[in-house]
Amino acid sequence: MRVIITAATVAEWMPSFLELDPLYSGESQRLKVQFHQSGVGMLASAVSITRMVYEDKPDLIIQAGIAGCFDSKQPLGNVVVIADELVGDMGVQEEGKWKDLFDLKLEKSNYHPYEKRKLPNPWLNTYNLMKLQEVSGITVNEITTE
């Protein structure tokens, strides 16, 4: 089985690498674990991961990172699975009010691939074999301190 652990930055997957590398440094016939840096932002990540899937044809991809979480109740390093994803900064700030793609009528909130404005994880029941905590994720390209 070919497993690729990917994240936007090396710092996000390095803790996993340090734990797994000694275990799988030899050539295993059953399991090969690789690490991949996808780059920061939706576009860089989508292009990089698509290329990696095309070239390496992994059996399983694990995307590591913070999953948009800034919740102090969620301990750093806690492993969760994304049940659904929200694109948090695709829209317009207009007259002091945020309008997303759905508010702007550029997308329908329940038109494929969206369900209630979110992108559901269609493989949740198939791949959440360890019954990890299911959470909602958020993807953004911009972070502000305002």
Image: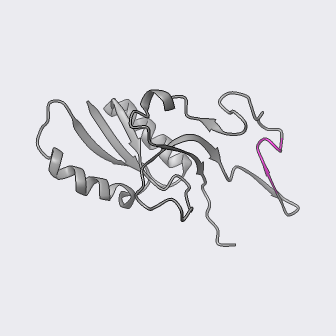
Q: In which quarter of the image is residue 54?
A: top left
> Which residue is the extreme one toward the right?
95
Residue 135 is a magenta residue: no
Give the vertical position of 62 relative to 41 (above or below). above
* Residue 99 horizontal/vertical position (percent): 81, 51
Which residue is at the front of the view, 46 or 80?
Answer: 80
> Which residue is the extreme one toward the left?
26
Q: In which quarter of the image is the C terminus?
A: bottom right
Q: Residue at x 46, y 61 (%)?
A: 75
Query: Seen in the image, is 84 located left or right of residue 60?
Result: right
* Residue 134 horizontal/vertical position (percent): 52, 43
Q: Residue at x 14, y 47 (%)?
A: 25
Q: Tell me, what colour scheme is on the image?
A: one colour
* Residue 91 horizontal/vertical position (percent): 75, 50
Q: Which residue is drawn at 56% across and 62% down?
A: 70
Q: Residue at x 48, y 46 (%)?
A: 45
Give the vertical position of 116 relative to 65 (above or below). above
Q: In which quarter of the image is the N terminus?
A: top left
Q: How many labels does the image show?
A: 0
Q: Quadrant of residue 116?
A: top right
Give the vertical position of 106 relative to 90 (above or below). above
Residue 102 is a magenta residue: yes
* Residue 83 horizontal/vertical position (percent): 55, 39
Q: Quadrant of residue 94?
A: bottom right
Query: Seen in the image, is 95 located left or right of residue 17?
Result: right
Which residue is at the front of the view, 116 or 133?
Answer: 133
Give the vertical position of 140 relative to 146 (above or below). above
Query: Seen in the image, is 47 located left or right of residue 19?
Result: right
Write down the region rendered in magenta: 98-104
